[in-house]
Image (tube, helix red, strand yellow):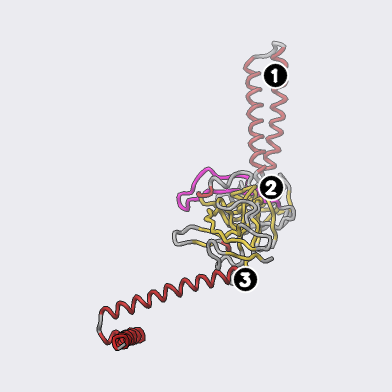
Amino acid sequence: MKKIIGLLLIGMTITQSCQNKSNATIEDIIAAGNLNDIKLKRQEISDQQKMLNRELELLDSAISSIDNNMKVPLVTTIEAETSHFKHFLDLQGDVMTRQNVLIYPEMPGTLLKVYVKEGQQVKKGQLLAVIDDGGMESQLEQLRTQAALAKTTYERQKRLWDQKIGSEIQFLQAKTNFEATRNTVEQAESQLAKSRITAPFSGIIDDVIQDEGTVVSPGTGVAVFRIVNLSDMYISVDVPESYLEGVTKGKEVKVYFPVLGDSITTRVRQTGNFINPVNRSFNVEIPVPNQTGNIKPNLTARVQINDYSNAEAILIPQSVISENAEGEQYVYLASNTSDDAFAEATKMIVKTGRTQGDLVEVLSGIRAGDQIIKEGARTVREGQQIQIIQ
């Protein structure tokens, strides 16, 4: 009996000692400086932490299975569809015309008469002004009289010569005299015509530079009129050489005139065959219809040239695209959609092409019919369960 009581007392002492060690605080164990006790305490805490983590996982799983709506992100989706995509290159150009010229005098003299005013519509060949010919017209009449006499003499000598009457010398002299006087008349007529200033083409007199009574001369470099044809207008645009393949003859062009507040649609008429080494660009010519006459030379125009088209392009908002650390672009798709609008977020790497406004063309990674997460795309993660809302 005494032995049993003794053993019980020893066991109680050992148990109390263990409990005291277990109940000891971390500070007490560290202060005691026993390495084994410190290691045991660390292992005890580690085991407790693992047990707690396993219990938390079990609880989370139970909560998720009981209530699917708990902590499931709400998202909206858009369906990927094919559409006809046109990319336009934005540039600036100037309106020009091939028929915008200064008219200079071809002979010196006083400007006797001006027959047109600024802004007047004229036709090709119409008389615009007359220069004093200095008596050249009177001289021309005398030359014409001499030429008529020489012609009559030649014709008579020719008839006689054809009948074998008269000498060959007389016939040749009459012929030579007639041809010489005729050439003199033609030269005088040509010179007299220079006193008459006419319109080289149909157009509008943009400026009357010299007034009546002014002495004009071809050597001074001073013009008399400026004439412009507003019916054959075009826009000249310098296009960077990188767009040489996309910008070709016949491509659609949208033109906007900021000053007029007017827009037109036309097509590329001509592309240059020379790359400017200074700015690495080539010239493009775009015709501009001008029925109203409001479009003027040197007017600034904003030009959009269609340099790329895809009849079956997939376009998505740029806002749904993200980029990872490697520089890859990606979107989230809603896959495995259930009847109750629950789905799984799937990350999809995409390759994009040209942009137009807020949209970007997707070259690979997305097919028509895919559901792309729009609202909430920044908060979901790969494989996460999501709920789609309308």
- Quadrant of res 94: bottom right
**Of the residues tagged 2 and 1, which is closer to the observer?**
2
**Of the residues tagged 3 and 1, which is closer to the observer?**
3
Q: Are marks 2 and 3 in contact (CB under 8 Å)?
A: no
Q: Quadrant of the C terminus?
A: bottom right
Mark number, residue 115: none
Note whether residue 168 is visible. yes
Number of labels in the image equals 3
Task: Give how far across and how far down residue 77 sits, in percent.
Answer: 64, 62
83 in the magenta segment: no
Mark number, residue 67: 3
Magenta span = 267-289
Counting residues from the N terminus, which is met first, the one under dot 2 or under dot 1?
Answer: 1
Residue beneath label 2, please? 199
Q: Amino acid at mark 1?
A: Gln
Label 3: which secondary element: loop
Q: Is residue 338 above or below residue 289?
A: below
Q: Find the distance from the CA under tag 2 to the CA under tag 1.
A: 44 Å
Q: Amino acid at mark 3?
A: Asp
Q: Find the distance from the CA under tag 2 to the CA under tag 3.
A: 90 Å
Of the pair 189 and 2, the residue shown nearer to us: 2
Of the pair 165 and 242, the residue shown nearer to us: 242
Residue beneath label 1, please? 157
- Quadrant of res 33: bottom left
**At 34% across and 75% down in the image, what residue appears?**
43
